[in-house]
Image (spheres, helix red, strand yellow):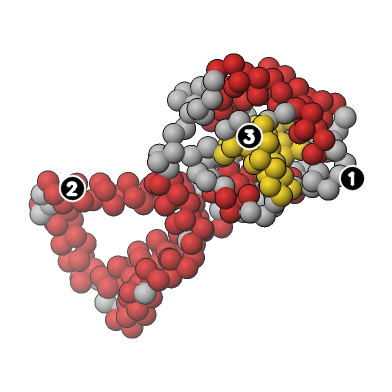
Amino acid sequence: MNSFTVGVSNFLWNIFNRPGLKDVLDILLVAYIIYKLMMLTSGTRASQVLKGFIVLIFASWLSGVIGLTAVNWVMMSVLNNGAIVLMILFQPEIRRALEHIGRGAKLDRIQSPQDDNQRIITEISQSMLSLSKRRIGALLVFERRTGLKDFIDTGITIDSMVSGPLLINIFEPNTPLHDGAVIIRDNRIVAAACVLTLSESSNLSRDLGTRHRAGIGVTESTDAMVIIVSEETGIISAAQGGKLTRHLDAEGLSRVLSDIYLNNNTPSLIGMWNSLKDKFMPRKARDEQ
């Protein structure tokens, strides 16, 4: 017990007397990295692994302070190989973080004439509303700064100007391209029938099917914007950053598309909506959506 008291006293003395300006800056940077890592893994299975790793670090320190030599040796052996363990466990999150850092090489604003952008917004909006009324499922993925070539290669190359009738024809049931996602880059439909990875989040409603989970999944690893039309209910939804906004009407859909084609330098409609919803809407009401 005496050694524990001495260890705590030395720890507190080091905290309040030894650190200089560089040490404070170093601690703040490490704290920021840990915070961003926790935000990156929030809502995923990796968050539980991260919490367990933090507990392991604390247990290792505590065992050293109170003199549990054998326990401390085991803990330190695990921590010494922690970098390799983290690389394996957090491979998806590390890749997502590196992709996020690498964004910026590609301009976010879509470089097309204003009139053409407005035409595209109208074409897409009308086609999605038409599919919604007929309860035909659809999944549109809009490429932004993060390239989607990995997903494009899984589908059928189209390389056509964005056209409402073409989108309706692609998603028409019992046609060769209706099953899968359409990927749009700037003002062109790049590919159809693309296969997307499903979301790993455990917080999604059980009412959401594969189409919604695939749409959310691609936004978890990229900055893409996704529009989804439910085949069962005809509800139009939009996804960005792993968040889903449902029950979009004609005006809401137009605003989402304008955010993609006209206002890329302004805060995202989906991000703003979810922030307001999380702040002011009761949790039960959010879950019922």
Instruction: Choose top left, top right, bottom left or bottom right for residue 67.
Output: bottom left
Image: 240 above or below 81: above
* 76 sits to left or right of 51: left
Residue type marked 2: Val
Q: Secondary structure at mark 2?
A: helix
Pinpoint residue 99: horizontal percent, then vertical percent. Answer: 45, 49
- The residue depicted at 40 percent of the width and 39 percent of the height is 104
The amino acid on which the numbered mark 1 sits, given as a three-letter code, is: Asn
Q: Are marks 1 and 3 in contact (CB under 8 Å)?
A: no
Task: Rate crowding at label 2 as few (under 14), some (14 to 19) or many (20 or more) other CA atoms within 10 Å.
Answer: few
Q: Nearer the viewer, mark 3 or mark 2?
A: 3
Q: Nearer the viewer, residue 105 or 48?
A: 105
- The answer to whether marks 3 and 2 mark residues whose Cβ atoms lie closer than 8 Å is no
- Residue depicted at 51% across the width and 58% down the height: 92
The residue that disc 2 covers is: 24
Of pointers 3 and 2, the one earlier in the residue sequence: 2
Q: Marks 2 and 1: which is nearer the front?
A: 1
Disc 1 target residue? 174
Q: Dot 3 corresponds to which residue?
A: 188
Residue situated furthest bottom in the rendering: 70
Q: How much space separates mark 3 and mark 2, taking CA atoms?
A: 50 Å
* Pointer 1 or 3: first along the chain: 1
Task: Tell me the SS state at disc 3.
Answer: strand
Q: Is residue 10 visible?
A: yes
Dot 2 or dot 1: first in sequence order is 2
Q: At which x and y percent is residue 279?
A: 53, 28
